[in-house]
Image: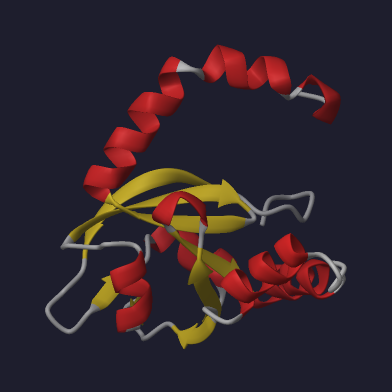
């Protein structure tokens, strides 16, 4: 965390998944993340890594979605049912469950992106295509974010 108590999970890093399905998280992230993290399915085919505290906040929001709405139930199931708690080993590696690795279509090379309070893990090829496409339309994206104070 920074001096104001806010997370500083930023930047992108290239890593590989070893033959034992382990992934080393960037050393700059390890102090912020702690010994245990929650990993779940993310949007656009990536995985999302939360600290235990941030997961409690996110899971609480999902639990408060109206169960009467089909979309709310579907998204809560998507995130909560696929979530798993993982402990970092002494070298900062996590073991990726097969079902999450298959969902994200990981081959060997991944890109790990810090997004302030969470981390996304992408197959590197998929990340390259996604980020290139997003950069082309960033002006349009920003113009739609005005109501959010951006």
Residue 144 falls in which quadrant of the image? top right
Is 120 in front, or is 71? 71
Q: Residue at x 34, y 26 (%)?
A: 132
Q: Residue at x 59, y 14 (%)?
A: 140
Q: Where is residue 81 in the image (x, y as percent from the top left)?
A: 58, 82
Q: In this view, does 27 lie to the left or right of 79?
A: left
The mark total stands at: 0
Q: Can residue 128 be seen in this view?
A: yes
Is 21 in front, or is 103? 103
Q: In this view, does 36 lie to the left or right of 88?
A: right
Q: Decide: is 42 above or below 141.
A: below
Q: In which quarter of the image is the C terminus?
A: top right
Q: Position of residue 138 (x, y in %)?
A: 53, 19
Q: Is residue 96 left or right of residue 74?
A: left
Q: Decide: is 127 above or below 79.
A: above
Q: Position of residue 95 (x, y in %)?
A: 33, 83
Is 26 in front, or is 51? 51
Is 108 in front, or is 37? 108
Q: Residue at x 74, y 50 (%)?
A: 3
Q: Which residue is drawn at 55% across and 79% down?
A: 83
* Structure colour scheme: secondary structure
Q: Decide: is 138 above or below 65.
A: above
Residue 28 falls in which quadrant of the image? bottom left
Q: Can residue 96 be seen in this view?
A: no
Q: Position of residue 30 (x, y in %)?
A: 47, 68
Q: Quadrant of the N terminus?
A: bottom right
């Amino acid at each position: 965390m920074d001096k104001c108590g806010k997370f500083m999970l930023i930047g992108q890093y290239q890593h590989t998944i070893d033959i034992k399905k382990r992934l080393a998280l960037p050393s700059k992230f390890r102090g912020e993340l702690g010994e245990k993290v929650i990993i779940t399915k993310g949007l656009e085919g990536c995985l999302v890594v939360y600290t235990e505290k941030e997961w409690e906040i996110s899971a609480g929001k999902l639990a408060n979605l109206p169960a009467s709405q089909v979309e709310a139930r579907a998204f809560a199931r998507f995130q909560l049912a696929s979530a798993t708690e993982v402990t970092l080993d002494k070298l900062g590696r996590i073991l990726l469950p097969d079902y999450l690795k298959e969902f994200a279509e990981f081959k060997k090379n991944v890109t790990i992106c810090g997004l302030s309070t969470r981390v996304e893990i992408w197959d590197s090829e998929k990340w390259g295509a996604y980020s290139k496409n997003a950069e082309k339309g960033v002006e349009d994206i920003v113009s739609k974010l005005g109501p959010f104070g951006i």
